[in-house]
Amino acid sequence: MDKKYDKYLEGNYDNDNKEKQEKADKLQAERIGKLVDNMRREQTEDLINSVLGDEELPIGDEEAVRELLHEYVSNKDEYLVDGAVLTCSMASTGTYLIGNVGLGTEIKNIKNPTQTLLRVSSNLSEINGMPVATVKDHKKQMNTGNIEQEETGNIEPFKCNCLSFPDRESEREAILNDEECKKYGICRQLMKLDNDWENFIRSTGYLSFNRTTEKERVQGITMKSVLFCSHGGLITPVTSGQINTKIVYALACATTGGPIGELEWEQMKANAEYIYNYFDSKGWTAEAICGLLGNIFEECKLNPGAWQHWNDVDEGYGLVQWTPAEDYIVSFAKLSTDSVNALAQNNPLELMNSELQFLEDSFNGRWLVGKPAQEQYAKLSLSPEIRDDMTYEEFSRSDYKVRDMTLIFQACYERSNDDAVALEERIIAAELWYDYLVGGNREISRDDFAS
């Protein structure tokens, strides 16, 4: 076997079967290495052909090739950011058996089990307000269900099985001892991400970004980058994580004490689409997103620049009217009242992304179940089959009725002073956004909303 394929070896052989497993491992490594070589050639050829169209590149014109490749790697729209969707060549949705134990019995109930997300929220460099991923972002993330004990990482294992069946005794033992494997498949125990991402397009022009420190400059990864799993899979991007629409709106205004105003209907729709795409790229269900949008609409009419009382950081501000506003403006965004108002006027995209990031970050401390939520559900109850102690992670992945998702977000995070009538208005707003964004009903107008 060519030495250049050594990095694709899995290792971890059983003592009793070392020779046999090592031989099989070398064959697999060579197969994967040649596959990678072919992918590299095909991607380069496809890229050149997509740029040239019907034109022909002069034979031997290496300078023209380099120029085309440099043009590609200089395009920021191709780079992966936090929330990029990934898939794997070895992902399998079937149920497996080891002995008499079924593995992956819940896969059939999972939306997109052969996809997972790339998480790089701590990276410093950003594109359009989103942290950029680099070749070093390949740490496996193991979700334990306990947020406080969660291991940090970049890639959560796929909730599915693997076409490369476990052939090591240590692998089988780990799988059978992991209750999550019985529900969500064996990938969580087999995934091994020891090597950096590979950038297939041969070029020295890849953009580099600050990762965890200002001094750490690392090459970015694009839609044509590939990550090798030592168990035999090739992980590739499905989406970059970048939001398609980059037009958002904000208006520095207030309910009392200052300039009064409201976004125009077309601006509200643009903001709703942006927020929908933002959370959709992070794996939220349409029902969860629209439940959120119903609450946002009632809080600020989709205006990230809205104050409850003008420039009063003790009152509410922003998409969900965080109270006190100081928590977001001063503690998180490190802004003053003047600078946040200037941001609403001059750079609404940056303001929107900042607030959405704060919304995500604040779920860990502000999402409350138990008595605080029970007090809210007493005003307007959930459907009988729905648990009232849902975590925010469960909420984001749930596809219950939009009505219930609206109430859950309101009870566990928003906790407004609304009575039952006002809560119904949130539900109406959420269902209208679902009809518009998911159902494709473009006849909906501002007048259809209750408030």
Image (cartoon, rainbow, N blue to C red):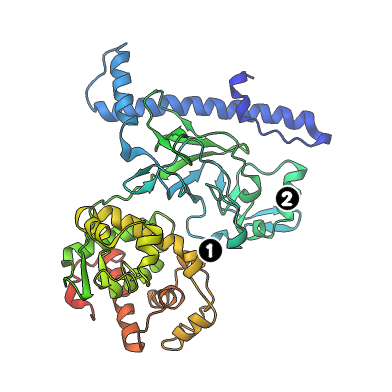
- SS label for mark 1: helix
- Whether residue 86 sits left or right of residue 307 in the image: it is right
| 29 on left or right of 326 | right
Q: Nearer the viewer, residue 402 or 347?
A: 347
Q: Amino acid at mark 1?
A: Asn
Q: Which residue ends up furthest to the top in the rendered image?
A: 60
Would you identify the image quadrant in which residue 406 lies?
A: bottom left
Side of 191 relative to 394 (left or right): right
Q: Where residue 89 sits: x, y (%)?
A: 52, 41
Q: Quadrant of residue 78?
A: top left
Looking at the image, which is closer to me, 86 or 136? 136
From this view, report whether residue 246 is shown above or below residue 55: below
**Rendering coords of residue 351 (x, y %):** 29, 56
Q: Is residue 398 above or below residue 50?
A: below
User: Would you place residue 76 above or below residue 365 in this image?
Assistant: above
Taking depth in this image into account, of 213 and 50 the one nearest to the observer is: 213
In the structure shown, which secondary structural element does the residue marked by tag 2 occupy?
A: helix
Give above or below for 357 relative to 419: above
For label 2, the residue is 174
Q: Quadrant of residue 240?
A: top left
Name the spot of residue 152 as percent of width and height, x first: 57, 51
Q: Is residue 388 visible?
A: yes
Q: Quadrant of the C terminus?
A: bottom left
Q: Nearer the viewer, mark 1 or mark 2?
A: 2
Q: Residue at x 18, y 66 (%)?
A: 263
| Of callouts 1 and 2, the N-terminal one | 1
Q: Residue at position x 47%, y 26% from top?
A: 38
Type of the residue with mark 2: Ala
Residue 86 locus on image (x, y percent): 47, 46
Residue that numbered label 1 is attached to:
109
Q: Is residue 432 visible?
A: no
Q: Residue at x 51, y 78 (%)?
A: 386
